[in-house]
Every structure is written in structure tokens, then in C-alpha cells.
Image: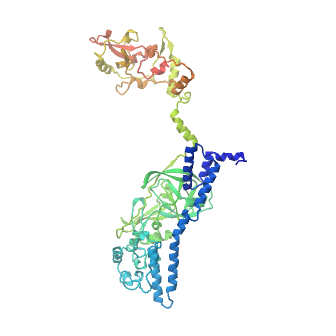
Amino acid sequence: MPHIKGLQVLNDCEENQKMLQKLPDWLTSRCNRHVTMQLKQLEEYPTFKEFADFVAQEAEIACSPVTSFHALKLTQEKPSREVKRSKANAFITNVKASDKSRIVSKTYIVGVSNSVDSNRSDKVTTVPSVSNPVTCRYCEESHSIHKCQTFASKPVEDKRKFILDNNLCFGCLRKGHNSKDCKSKATCSVCKKHHPTPLHEDRPSSTAVTFSHAIQAEQNTSSLSCCVDSGDGGSTSMIVPIWISSTSTPEREILVYALLDTQSSNTFVDQEVCERMGAVSEPVKLKLTTMMGKDSIVQSERVSGLRVRGFTSHGLISLPTAYTRDFIPLERSHIPTPETARRWNHLNEIAQEIPMLLDCEVGLLIGYDCSRALAPRQVMTGGDDEPYAIRTDLGKSIVGSSPKIAKSTEVTGLCHRVSVKELPNLTPTSIIRALESDFGDTNPRERSISQDDIQFMQLMNEKIHKNSEGHLEMPLPFKTRPQLPENKQLALVRLKRLKGKFEKDPKFKNGDAERAEHQPKEGNVWYIPHQGVYHPRKPEKIRVVFDCSAKYDGTALNDHLLAGPDLTNGLTGVLCRFRKYPITIICDVERMFHRFHVSQEDRDYLRFLWWKNGDTNTEPKEYHMKVHLFGAASSPGCAN
């Protein structure tokens, strides 16, 4: 670096951050602590040389052959290997080939010690001697319970009761654990399934219940849409084998099982399957709502162009946009097979149409966003509580469960109710737009003009003029000239409330109002209620406010007036001009709205009631305003 100036860029903190992203999390945490302490002490960021020295030192610490974590872990693992080696030697030296019964007995003893706990040295080293025979837990004879004919001949319920009473495992018939945690499940010598041979039971008919249900009930059970059930193959769902491919690589077809899920809003594909197909994807963030939580944000990839077809069909179905997941939560025991159909008389005829259990993974979950794949083309039903068969374009499946025979102590349920919402990607442009949303007035010239504003400006340009008194006169800017109801009664009620509050209004003396002598046409008149208001800073002066928003028969004057465009100066522009010049002048136009008169034909819409000469003992007379009112929606636009 001292000789090549271009390498000085590595001293920059941003370049250092890129290198930190390639380090393990524990080393990044230590480096963060080191950098923070140096910034506090020296107030400068470490150089690249200091970063390289730090990484070299940490690498030397991590690779210490004596005190590093890896070295200590290897030291802890040595005793277990030595015990295993010594036990194997003892097995070889203590067994005599001439004594066949003792060879079998010794072999079984060593097997028991391994299955109970292969990681605990006390269990492994306390191997019984060869002279101690194996004792059956049921009949206490010198054979294992796996070969006990007495136990195997007992009824199913008696065998199950014996296993539960003695806290034995349904998978290996040993103590200390249950079948869910069993790591050495026995294999049946009759059906080759994972259960002890004495627990095998032939199924005489489709309605008979075998003991294998109880075995698997303790292992793992699940059902679609929160329907929890138990049994070995007793619960099946809409799962079919399909061929999946991508439009980008149509020659790569992969055989997987697909779950047809009517409770998922979107389609999901296994990440590994997507990579094997070579499908094009892009990273996204998803907001998932499931039974485990609401609005959980997860990382995923969006995949488009997926196609599927049935196991034996050639018709392709295009899938909507799918999202990748690390795995599809599904139990293989819920896949329907021909044996599932043969258990029921009403499904026996379709047993040949359902494929055997295939050696392929569950790689796809199709939601209700692909209705063609989920649409039932044929349904075969039986009794009220019996499973039913569904034929879709992807094949036939069986949905339902066999009758329950006993309660299970441990039940696990799978629910596939999924709601998906894709979150938008945060780009620098969107972040800047969000930050600038708080300063929407930065460019006051960019103001949108509505059609009402255009209509307002055209009316003002055509009708505004200077009258004989020297004032600008303009009409009331109606949206459309209205036909208003007779609201004189409303004005009389409001006038009575004002009686006694004040005796005269100074505005009338200034000629802002005049006596309305003529009678207007019906619908072309509106009486405006009014009231007096005192400003806190001008307690000696009253302001008459006309309530143009007062509704009568569901309408008000302001509902029919155009407000006009907003020509008020923006706050940002005002503040900027404050900084531009040394002196600021603020002024107020006194009675600004009264400087603009209303056209003669529109003054009847501004009628109000008042007593002649302010004498409240006389009958109120009708007046109308000649000027634009403080309280009318159109007055600010007309004044501007």
C-alpha cells in the first residue's frame, strides 16, 4: 500500500464494511467492538493495515491447538471414542464361538446399551456379563420381548395396555423414551414397516383397525386445515405426484409430490427443486399470515414460468407466480396409495388409478391462485365419516381419515392455512420519495389544477368588471346555477338568537348592505344566518360572520360554489424570502372581501334578515349583501 496510491481506498470505512460482510458473525462482533473503542479514543477509523493485523491475530487465536474451542471440543469427544473401542474389544475377546447361545445373548446386550444412550459413558461401560441371560419384560423367560410368542399372541388392546403401563417405546419396546424420540425403531419381519414384529397385526377387512394406528399416533400426526387425526396411513390429503418444469428449461422435468391446498393464497415451490430445474428467480420479501403468527416477514424468491402435468397425463398447466421455501411441511404418511383405496368398499375401484408410494420429495404446494389445478372434476363419496376421492387435472387423491381407535398422548398437527402478501422492494428512489413526502411544498409551482379550477378561472375572466363605484364586480362562481329551497324560516330562528346581543351592526352604515325591495323568483333566493364575533385582540370591534355553510333541507350555499385554485404562497417560499432580504414587511388589507362587489343578478342569494335602524322591537326586514362574504367558500378565490 505505501507504494501503490490506488490501494489507499482500502482505508475507507465503506470498503472495510464490504470486507466485514465476508467474515463470520462472531468475528464481526469482535471487530465492531475494536473499531468502536478506537473511535472513542483516537477519533479516527482504523486503517486497512490495522484491520489486517486484527484478522490475523483472531485467526491465530481461533486456530490454537490447545485452548481454542475446536481443540477443546476434540478433547471432550476422545473419551467416548475410547469407550466404544474398549467395548468392541471386550465383545470380541469375551465371546466364544463354541457357545452359540452365549454369542446371541451377548450380541443382544451390547445392542441394548447402544440404543438406550450412546453418548453416556456410564450406560455403555456397565455392560452385563455374558453369564446374565436376557429376560423378557412380559413373561420373564430367557429371551427378548421381540421373540416372545406369548406377548405376540395377545390381543391388540392387551399389548397396548402393557406397553403404556410399563412406559415402553412403541418403536423398539425399550424404556426411557417414546416412539417420537426413538432413534432405533425396529423393523417388522412380516410387513417390513417400522414397528416391532410382535405388534404386527393382519388386517382382515377394510373396516378393521390395526394396532399400527396406535403406534404411529404417538409418533407424528397431521391433517390439512387444522383437522388433527392419528393413525398409520389413516389420514390422507390431496397429494398427487406430478411432473414440474420451467418454461426457461422445459427439458428438465422433475417428479415431485404436490399438495393441492385450498387454504393457501399462493403457490410455493421447494428451493432445491427450483435450483434443479434451473428456473429464473428474483429475491423478494413476503409477509406471511399462518396459525403460528400474523404478518411474519420472511426472505424468499419469486419464480415465474412454472408448468406442471399429472403423473400419467401430458396436458400442461401453467402455474401463477410462485415463491420458494426451504421445505414444504407435509408428512409422507398422508400420501394416498392403492392400499388406502382398498380399505374402503366405495374406493376399491380406483385403487389401480392411484400410484404406489414413489421415492420422490414433496416439492410443491399449489394454492387457490391456480384454480384449474384444484378444481374437482369428479368426487366419489361414501358414508358420512368415510374418506372421499377427488379427481383433478393432476390426478386422483383421497381425502379423509380412518376411525380413531384410541387417544394418543402426543399429537402434532399441521395447518396449511397461509395468507401471502409480497412486500415492495426498497430502492433508493422509493426511500428518497418517502423522505421528501414531509416536504411536499418544496416546489410550489408544481400544483395541479382541477376542472373546477379551470371553470372558475374562465368565469372570472369573462364576468369580472369595474362598476360605477370603482369596485371590481364579479358574479358568484356557481358550479351550476342552483334552485334552492325556501329557507327564510331558518333565518328567522337564527335571528331570534341574536336579539339582545347587539343593537346595531357598523357595517350597514358603510353601505355594504342594501334594502332588498323587489321580490326574486322562486328558487333564486337564499337567506343567510349571521352572528357577531369579537376578535380577542380587538374587543371593541365586532365582526359579522355569515354562515354560508348552514344547511336547510340537506343543502347549503357553499355546496354550490366553486372555491377556485389555491393561489396562497407556500410556506417554504415565504421562509426562503425571509432569508433573502434583510427587512420583512407584513400587512393586512382591511375588510378585503368587501372591496369586491357581487353582480346584481346574484345578490338575492346573499339575503339576510335585520331590523330597520337596529330597532329590535320592529319586524325584521329583508336585506342582501352587495359584497363577497367572509364565510363563503368562493371569497378567497375571488379576492386572489
Q: Across the whole image, how many numbered discs are drawn on residues?
A: 0
Q: For residue 321, say whether it is visible.
A: no
Write down the quadrant of residue 230 in the picture: bottom left
Q: Position of residue 99 (x, y in %)?
A: 48, 90
What colouring does the structure picture have? Answer: rainbow
Viewer-nearest residue: 7 or 209:
7
Residue at 57% x, 46% y is: 38
Q: Residue furthest bottom?
A: 98
Q: Tell me if residue 514 comes above or below residue 44 in the rendering.
A: above
Write down the quadrant of residue 64 in the picture: bottom right
Viewer-nearest residue: 393 or 530:
530
Drawn side of residue 535 relative to residue 452, left or right: left
Viewer-nearest residue: 342 or 285:
285
Viewer-nearest residue: 569 or 396:
569
Write down the quadrant of residue 101 in the picture: bottom left
Q: Tell me if residue 488 comes above or below residue 414 in the rendering.
A: above
Q: Position of residue 145 (x, y in %)?
A: 40, 81
Q: Residue furthest left?
A: 617
Q: Position of residue 237 (x, y in %)?
A: 44, 63
Q: Position of residue 544 (x, y in %)?
A: 37, 17
Q: Tell me if residue 112 comes above or below residue 429 in the rendering.
A: below
Q: For residue 545, say whether it is visible.
A: yes
Q: Residue furthest front?
A: 41
Drawn side of residue 280 relative to residue 471, left or right: right
Residue at 50% x, 82% y is: 90
